[in-house]
């Protein structure tokens, strides 16, 4: 597998003014990588950075408590920090990595899709979805995607670059703060779930994604305290990434975007299948189940007349049952079609029949609750429109 990971981010000079931060951002844009952020640094790098500013290391813990514990980067509110050093510390540790361009609201305010502009002008998306018993944030891990799935809006954008850990984590911090402050319909609440199902292939940016997972799941002041069991990492089937994740010992849920029950059809829908076929992908997914003791989610976008017929459901059931019982949960997903695309959503009758066949075969399956159908709901649609 080609390693698309970004090089380790170095420690960059701090500054004391907005003008300096603008220069810093332009400098990083020329060099092609984001400014180093608190979330990109390990403990020793943070301490070394603080020392360069003449700050003792206990100040690093204070900053961590503000960032992870309070989801705060507004140095003016750091009342436990020396007033004369607040702006300097914010410039050195909390450069702006994501800037809101626009947002779309659906489902009576319970779904909020945000388009973000990154330091180099790149566009990414995140979607916050509030349900009665949980609030889930869908985040991006790459600018665009190199997997080339023809029915996916992000796939049509191509891959621009990987995102830094800081750029990934910032999506979570902003959403967690919005929930805490009651900025989402339903009043104050808590961000409970995070899914890496936004723009990009998480396994193609493994190092930054894993760093983000650790920071999301660690307890404050090392992280946001969202249980690893409530984090889902999705992949189209990058087998080395699945096997690498299984060795980490972190109980995140694995989601495999299968979309087809056989190689002939999947070669067309998911080009990565020509490199790692359905047998290799399902073998790796089942091994992940054995290692993690967590059921794997099989994502299956239903497309009218293409992969949604009874024969496809029966074949999928046979493929999954080959490995034994109760190791996978299938999520058939009504496709949110791209404007002008030949790929479109299945008929409701075909969706029902697909589910019935899986259930009859003993496969646990739930039709995905689609959100944002009255906005640019499919991943990548908002970024493509802005472009």
Image: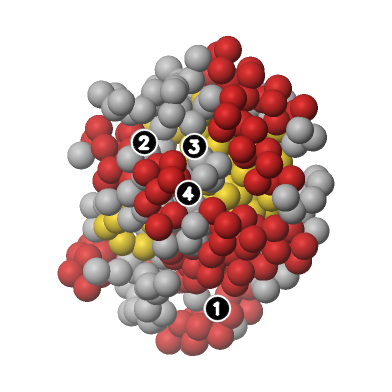
Q: Tag 1: Cα neighbours inside 10 Å, few (<14), some, or many (≥20)?
A: few
Q: Nearer the viewer, mark 2 or mark 3?
A: 2
The residue closer to the viewer here, 152 or 87, is 152
Q: Position of residue 103 (x, y in %)?
A: 39, 31
The CA span between labels 4 and 1 is 42 Å
Q: Residue at x 40, y 48 (%)?
A: 267
Counting residues from the start of the chain, the first of labels 2 and 1 encountered is 1
> In which image quadrant can residue 275 be found?
bottom left
Q: Nearer the viewer, mark 1 or mark 3?
A: 3
Q: Residue at x 62, y 39 (%)?
A: 316
Q: Tag 2: Cα neighbours inside 10 Å, few (<14), some, or many (≥20)?
A: many
Label 3: which residue?
A: 127
Tag 1, which secondary structure?
Answer: loop
What number of labels is visible?
4
Label 2: which residue?
A: 151
Q: Position of residue 27 (x, y in %)?
A: 21, 71
Q: Residue at x 75, y 36 (%)?
A: 363
Label 4: which residue?
A: 263
Counting residues from the start of the chain, the first of labels 3 and 4 encountered is 3
> What colour scheme has been applied to the protein in the rendered image?
secondary structure
Whether the residues at callouts 4 and 1 have beta carbons within 8 Å, the answer is no
The residue closer to the viewer here, 379 or 219, is 379
The CA span between labels 2 and 3 is 19 Å
Can residue 373 be seen at all in this image of the molecule? Answer: yes
Label 1: which residue?
A: 42
Point out the image quarter for the C terminus: top left
The CA span between labels 2 and 1 is 39 Å
Whether the residues at callouts 2 and 1 have beta carbons within 8 Å, the answer is no
Left of 310 or right of it: where is 376?
left
Tag 4, which secondary structure?
Answer: helix
């Amino acid at each position: 597998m080609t390693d698309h990971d970004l090089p380790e981010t170095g420690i960059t000079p701090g500054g004391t003014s907005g003008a300096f931060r603008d220069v810093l951002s332009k400098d990083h844009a020329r060099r092609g990588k984001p400014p180093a952020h608190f979330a990109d640094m390990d403990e020793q790098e943070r301490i070394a950075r603080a020392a360069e500013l003449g700050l003792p290391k206990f100040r690093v813990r204070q900053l961590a408590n503000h960032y992870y514990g309070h989801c705060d980067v507004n140095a003016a509110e750091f009342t436990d920090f020396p007033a004369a050093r607040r702006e300097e510390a914010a410039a050195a540790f909390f450069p702006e990595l994501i800037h809101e361009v626009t947002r779309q609201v659906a489902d009576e305010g319970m779904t909020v899709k945000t388009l973000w502009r990154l330091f180099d002008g790149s566009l990414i998306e995140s979607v916050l979805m509030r349900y009665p018993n949980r609030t889930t944030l869908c985040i991006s891990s790459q600018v665009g995607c190199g997997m080339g799935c023809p029915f996916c809006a992000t796939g049509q954008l191509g891959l621009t670059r990987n995102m830094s850990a800081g750029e990934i984590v910032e999506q979570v911090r902003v959403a967690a703060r919005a929930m805490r402050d009651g900025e989402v319909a339903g009043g104050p609440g808590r961000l409970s779930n995070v899914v890496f199902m936004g723009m990009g292939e998480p396994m193609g940016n493994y190092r930054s994604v894993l760093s983000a997972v650790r920071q999301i799941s660690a307890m404050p002041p090392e992280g946001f305290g969202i249980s690893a069991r409530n984090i889902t990492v999705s992949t189209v089937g990058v087998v080395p990434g699945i096997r690498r994740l299984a060795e980490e010992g972190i109980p995140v849920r694995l989601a495999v975007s299968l979309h087809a029950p056989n190689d002939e059809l999947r070669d067309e829908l998911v080009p990565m299948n020509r490199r790692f076929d359905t047998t290799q992908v399902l073998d790796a997914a089942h091994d992940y189940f054995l290692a993690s003791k967590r059921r794997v989610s099989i994502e299956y976008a239903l497309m009218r007349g293409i992969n949604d017929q009874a024969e496809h459901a029966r074949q999928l059931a046979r493929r999954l049952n080959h490995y034994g019982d109760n190791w996978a949960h299938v999520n058939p997903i009504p496709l949110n079609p791209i404007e002008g695309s030949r790929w479109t959503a299945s008929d409701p009758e075909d969706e029902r029949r697909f589910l019935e066949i899986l259930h009859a075969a003993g496969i646990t399956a739930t039709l995905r609750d689609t959100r944002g159908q009255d906005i640019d709901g499919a991943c990548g649609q908002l970024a493509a429109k802005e472009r």
